[in-house]
Image: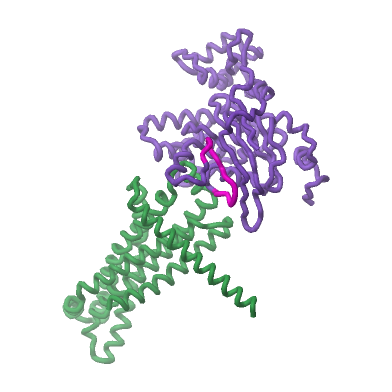
Chain colours: A green, B purple
Amino acid sequence: MVDQIRHVGSLTMELVGEMGRMFLFLWDVMLSFVTPPFRWTNFLKQVHFIGIRSLFVIALTAVFAGMVLALQGYYTLSRFGSEALLGPAVALSIIRELGPVLSGLMVTGRAGSALTAELGIMRIREQIDALEVMGIQPLKYLVSPRVEAGILVLPILTVLFDVIGIWGGYLIAVRLLGMSAGTFFGGIESSVEMHDIVTGLIKSVSFGLIVTWICTYKGYFTRRGAEGVSQATTSAVVLSSVLILVCDYFITSVML
Amino acid sequence: MSQPVSPTDSAPLSGSDGIPLSLGRQLVANGCVTARQLDLALQRHRPGGEKSASAEHLVGRTLVEMGYISHANLLDCLYQQFARERDLYQVDTTLAPVINLEGVVKILDNRRVLDAVDLAIPANRVTAIIGMSGGGKSVILKHMVGLMKPDQGSVKVGGVALGKLSSRELSRIRGRFSLLFQGGALFDSLNVHDNVAFPLREKTRLSESDIHARVMRCLEEVNLVGMERKFPDELSGGMMKRAALARALVTDPEILLLDEPTAGLDPIIENAIHYLICDTYMRTRYTMVVISHAVPEIFKWCHHVIALHKGKVLYSGPSREVGQSRDPVLRQFIQGELDGPIQVI
């Protein structure tokens, strides 16, 4: 019994300690945002890596998410004779929820895992130590540009997701199921408000921060060789994904 | 346990005229080349005929290229120059060491890796740190540059305790160092040229043409000209070490730390790396700290030896005297015997 309590206590202490280290890391990264020198090339490279190279997967996810939403929505709404509300249903679901959440999850899978693995390999091959010995702050040089790029890029990807997702819904509703385009888009125009778009954007900025923060943290503090990199990558993806969903709930409950 | 030495305590490397012997003059004195051949090589190496020390030093390679001497001749000559200086080296406790560890304790994973370590690194000398694997040698190196902080004790560089410095001050102190990591720590996404240029681009305001010139000079010094567009994964182990050495040298550091520069290399490349280290030292007179398992070979290439065992300093003194130690652990380590106080099997 005493051993079990001790074990629980030790796990709790470890968890609290890890959270403390994560927040201290985030604080240091935030400070480095405003500390010179500003390396625009590094930042643009990360915008390219996290943003441009995620476009295809975002577009693919968005179009199928919109299509399946329209298909499911049509058959559900038709039971109540409310097919005319399909446009707003698809648009609001995508803009408020699916756009930011799925973009966040896709970026986690495509770019976040790569960020963790890259920094993890740099850590175990002593490249991060080499930067420090050269008098270059690794947080400023390696982590800041990635977090800044994530915060900037995810809202842009989310907007693209929204547009392509609604277009996917349009394909199914109008082209396949024969709804009128005027009804589909008219409903969207009358029901989507600026508040909905802002909510989606606030979520996407938060998710951009979460993904890059967690993934860079896990990579930066990787230990124990190749196995450590693999563990760090897995735990970064799992933790980022879970935190995106948890954070989504809290933002939704505040912004509703 | 400070054991600093005087940078001037060795006799000058002099010829009969009292002028210090450069590498070229040493080659002539050894009868490897004639004075005429040396002049020809100097003119070829520096078309203006400049006879600076570094020009004459680099002329060794030109003499090899011209077929007047072999690499073995050159190595032998360099070694003779260095050996003469090494054999005259004396520990001088009156001078302040450049790096000083005082009572340093470090515990990693519940293991006391460093146990009240006191050591002093003499200025402008080559110091080798030897010891069993896992004995804390790399940990000491990381303490010297502030990558690790001691749990107890202090690390001083030039008399300044690293533990009390702000990150900006620490960064300034680190500007005096270059560290050659065991695995090279070259950046995978950059080619050899950009890896070597990296510290200059990040830490100096030099123009791109000046940076290129310095990079090419360093690559020439480590015999990597022609490899500058290769990426680290396209290099052999020896080339990677030489590229990393070029990156360490490009900033002209005061203190050069080398973490197992010959680990995992074949004997020929190992010899070549030792030659490069000796060559670099003779040309620059940097303070050098080399961690090495190449025992007893490394004793030929250093002035001062520090032997570590179980987190404590077993020996610290001139390399020529390490073989005379009566410490059974040190004797077993140097002779590589299985029987003795160190139980491996």
| Residue closer to the observer: B149 or B216 | B149
Q: Is residue A199 left or right of residue B68?
A: left
| Residue closer to the observer: B134 or A59 | B134
Numbered range of the magenta stretch: B148-160
Instruction: For residue B276, say whether it is visible.
Output: no
Q: In this view, does B15 lie to the left or right of A138?
A: right
| Residue closer to the observer: A143 or B121 | B121
Q: In this view, does A148 lie to the left or right of B29?
A: left
Quadrant containing the N terminus of chain B is: top right
Q: Is residue A32 left or right of residue A238?
A: left
Indicate the position of residue B38 as horizontal and vertical percent values.
56, 13
Above or below residue B228? Residue B18 is above
Q: How many labels does the image show?
A: 0
Residue placed at 62% from the left, 55% from the top?
Answer: B108
Quadrant of the rendered image containing residue B297: top right
Above or below residue B285? Residue B327 is below
Residue placed at 24% from the left, 86% from the top?
Answer: A83
The magenta stretch spans residue B172: no
Above or below residue A16? Residue B104 is above
Residue placed at 70% from the left, 48% from the top?
Answer: B310
The magenta stretch spans residue B157: yes
Q: Farthest residue in the front direction?
A: B94
Q: Farthest residue in the right direction?
A: B339
| Residue closer to the observer: A18 or B238 | A18
Residue placed at 64% from the left, 12% from the top?
Answer: B29
Quadrant of the rendered image containing residue B21: top right
Indicate the position of residue B138 as horizontal and vertical percent values.
61, 45
Indicate the position of residue B63 as horizontal and vertical percent values.
57, 18
Instruction: For residue B211, say whether it is visible.
Output: yes
Indicate the position of residue B141 as horizontal and vertical percent values.
58, 43
